[in-house]
Image (tube, rainbow, N blue to C red):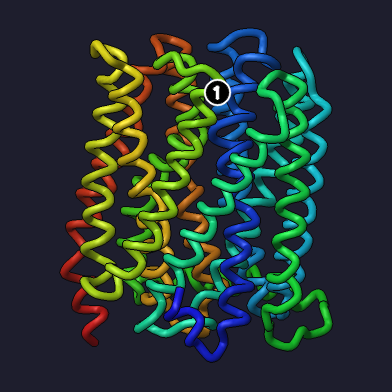
Amino acid sequence: MKSILKLKNKKQVISWALYDFANQPFTTIIVTFIYSIFFVNEIALNEKYGTTMWSYSIAITAIVVSLLSPILGALADSGGYRKFFLTVLTWITCLCSVFLFFPQNGQVFFALTLFVVANICFELSGVFCNSYLPDLSDKKNMGTISGFAWGLGFIGGLLALFLSFVLFDLDPLGIRKINILVGVWFFIFSIPTIIFLRDKKRKKFSKYHFLNSFTTIKNTFKTISQYKVITQFLISRLFFNDGLVTIFALGGVYASTTVGFTNEEVMYLAIVLNFAAGIGSFVFGLIEDKIGVLKVIRLTLAILITATLIAFIAPETKYPKEIFWFSGILLGLMVGPNQSCSRSLMAQLTPPKKMNEFFGFYALTGKATSFVGPLLFGLITHIYNQQIALLVVILLFFIGFLLFNRIEFSIKSFNNK
């Protein structure tokens, strides 16, 4: 924190980091721990149907984001509309989050429509938020700033969870009210980001900007071979990020329906995991600047694989909840650093003039196949059970780990040029 306060542009850095503080409750409460379980257990007809439908909603989000993110990124680059898109997408997410109060038992498609729209806008807003990182940092402090933002984000998720626990009962009505809190929280704490972040001068929007966005994407595909290291990194991230997406979407459901956690225990789990994630983000942000982003990413992947294996065997042990608690804390400690360091590495590898466009592809690779994990999880759950379905996550982490290790030397060479 002291290093952040010493920055000349600390006002913009803190305003940018507050966006993670603002949006994390959406992921923590709606996507992972609270609303997902409420949907599966209360809105859907049964557990298997609910898990499958929730998986499909995550898959739809992934497909739409993968198609739109590079287009919007290139459009923002050519027309200077980065903050405009960030603002509009944020407000839509907030509004849909509040409206999630209304769906009740049996209203599956009403609930999923609101969730999918909110989740799509949430993910797309991250494209534009991430693209500000290189403007606010340099190679010496990029890891610290990125880790600070992720850590602040998990603190936001932690505080929102605590506030939810204090203000609302964990009955159906109380959980529906928590969605309103998420939307209002996101809106209020994103205000500094929208006000204080500086953007390049906006050009008058024209047909040229729209057409140029497609031309830019086409040219990027043609010249992508010139950025071989970036391509290799994005392919490896495609797999391990897919594993994270599946954990985020269905980890709470697994804890509730397979391990046997009550709503209160899931809430406690969420609080502890966010606390662990915040610590992990802050600590590994500093470590990244000392030992390098490559070593940190490799370490997080190894521990994520181990933690998921422990979660897989937990239901078969004498103390399933205690074992799952251990695996959850390990996951929490590594999730923040993995995402933060991935964002940091992408910013280091990307040419300055292509930041928005390449961060659009960063989101593209993060979402292009991210429907696979949740979709397979839902299908395998429908055929077998959630425990067997968790093997999908282990496989995705392992493939990502192998691919990332294969390109490490290339990345070192790239950075030494």
Apparent side of residue 357 relative to residue 84 in the rendered image (left or right): left
Q: Position of residue 397 (x, y in %)?
A: 29, 41
Secondary structure category for the residue under label 1: helix
Apparent side of residue 234 relative to residue 63 in the rendered image (left or right): left
Q: Looking at the image, which residue is at 78% across and 19% down?
A: 104
Please, is residue 95 above or below residue 153 in the view?
Answer: above
- Which image quadrant is residue 168 in? top right
Please, is residue 352 above or below residue 301 in the view?
Answer: below
Q: Looking at the image, which residue is at 43% across and 10% down?
A: 383
Q: Position of residue 25 (x, y in %)?
A: 61, 46
Q: Is residue 262 visible?
A: yes
Q: Which residue is mark 1?
A: 264
Residue at the outermost bottom position: 8
Q: Nearer the viewer, residue 302 or 400?
A: 302
Amino acid type indicated by mark 1: Glu
Q: Looking at the image, which residue is at 72% across and 51% down?
A: 185
Q: Nearer the viewer, residue 372 or 270?
A: 270
Q: Nearer the viewer, residue 3 or 17?
A: 3
Apparent side of residue 23 relative to residue 192 in the rendered image (left or right): left
Please, is residue 76 above or below residue 163 in the view?
Answer: below
